[in-house]
Image (cartoon, helix red, strand yellow):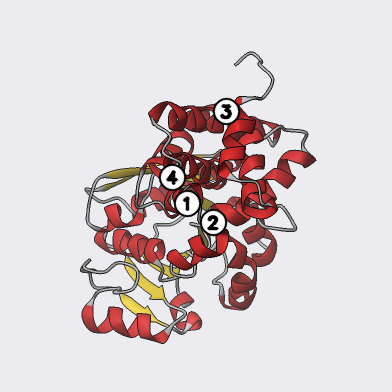
Amino acid sequence: MTTEIQRVAVLGAGSWGTTFAKVLADAGRDVVLWARRPEIAEAITESRCNPEYLPGVTLPALETTTNAAAALDGADAVVLAVPSQTLRPNLTAWRPLLPTGVTLVSLAKGVELGTLERMSEVVAEVADVSSDQVAVLSGPNLAREIAVGEPTATVIACRDHDRAVALQNACLTPYFRSYTNTDVIGCELGGAGKNVIALAVGMAAGMGLGDNSRASLITRGLAEISRLGVALGADPLTFAGLAGLGDLVATCSSPLSRNRTFGERLGRGDTLAEAEAANHGQVAEGVKSCLSICQLGGRHGVELPISDTVRRVCHEGLSPAEMAKELVSRAPRPE
C-alpha cells in the first residue's frame, strides 16, 4: 500500500520544474526545489520569484537549494524536471542519494538518443528500481499558464495505480486537475511525439500557411504518433486523451510553445543556428527527439512521414517548402 506523499523533492528549476513545485506547494506539500545554478536558488529564496524562467510570478513558500542530498533527504516522491537528453547523467549522480522505495516522477518528454529508451525506462534502469516505482506526468501543460493559476488538466501515468493516485492527491489544487492512467507507454510517446509535430506546424505557420494546413498536420501527426504507440504496446485510446490530443493541440497552437515558435522561425527561413540563437541558445526538444523517434519507428516498421520530414529539415538541409510539397504529393491512401 502506497503511503501519502507529503515531502517532495523537485530536481530542476527551469520553467516546468518551478511551476510544478508551485503546484505541489499550493496543494499543501512540503517542497524542496533543487536548482543547478546558485543564482537561481538565491533569487527564489530572496524574492520568491524565478526571474529567468517565470518572471513576474510570485511563488509560494518552498525551500530552494543547490544541494541534491539535502533536497532528497526524507522525500516521499522525487520529481525529475531536467531535459530528456540530460536525464541519464543527472540521475546517475543522484542515484546514491535516493530514499529507498521513493516514487520517481519524470516530467521530461522525449526518447533518449542512442538507446531509444523512453524516460521511464531510463529512470528505472539508472535508479535500478522496478518500473512500478516510476511515474510520468504528461498533458497540455504550458508552464506559464499553470504558474499564473489558469485551469489545466494532466495525466499521471504509472503501472502501479496506487502510486498514481497518491501523486494525484499530492498535486490537487483548484487550478490543476490530474487524471490517472496505467498506460505509461502511450502517455510518454504522446508527449515525445507532439514536440516533433509542433515543429512541423510551426514551420507551416512561419511559411504563412493557414488553418487547413495546420489542422491537417495536427491530425495526421496524431495518427502517426498513435501508430508508433500501438506498435510499442500502448492503448490507442490514450492518444485521444489529455496526454495525446490535448498535449498535441496545446503545443501546436500556443506561442508559449518552444517547439511551435522554433518551427515558425525555420518556416520563415532561419537556419537551425539562427533559430537556436533567437531561442536564448536553447534547441527545442523536438529537434533532438525527431532523430530518436524516427529511429524508433524504423526499428518497429512504423511509417512516420511528418516526423521524418521534420528530421530532414533539422538535420539534412531539406527546406520547409520542400517538406510541404513532399507531404502533399505522397501517394493517395485510405485514412
Residue type for callout 3: Ala
Instruction: Identify the residue under disc 2.
Output: 285
Instruction: Kindly state the secondary structure of the residue where label 3 is placed.
Output: helix
Relative to 186, does residue 3 appear above or below in the rendering? below
Q: Is residue 60 visible?
A: yes
Which of the two discs, 1 and 4, sits closer to the camera? 4
Q: Is residue 234 visible?
A: no
| 88 sits to left or right of 55 | right
Q: Where residue 330 sits: x, y (%)?
A: 67, 24
Label of residue 223 in the image = 3
Which image quadrant is residue 309 in?
A: top right
| 63 sits to left or right of 95 | left
Label of residue 210 in the image = none
Distance between mark 3 and mark 4 Cα atoms = 23 Å
N-term-proximal mark, 1 vs 2: 1
Label of residue 206 in the image = 4
N-term-proximal mark, 4 vs 2: 4
Relative to 327, does residue 94 appear above or below in the rendering? below
Relative to 112, does residue 206 appear above or below in the rendering? above
N-term-proximal mark, 3 vs 2: 3
Residue shown at 60%/16% (left/top)? 335
Mark 4 closeness class: few <14, some 14–19, many ≥20 residues within 10 Å: many
Residue type for callout 2: Glu
Marks 3,2: beta carbons within 8 A:
no
Label of residue 259 in the image = 1
Which image quadrant is residue 23 in?
A: bottom left
Residue type for callout 4: Gly
N-term-proximal mark, 3 vs 1: 3
Mark 3 closeness class: few <14, some 14–19, many ≥20 residues within 10 Å: some
Which image quadrant is residue 87 in?
A: bottom right
Residue type for callout 1: Asn
Residue shown at 39%/31% (left/top)? 210
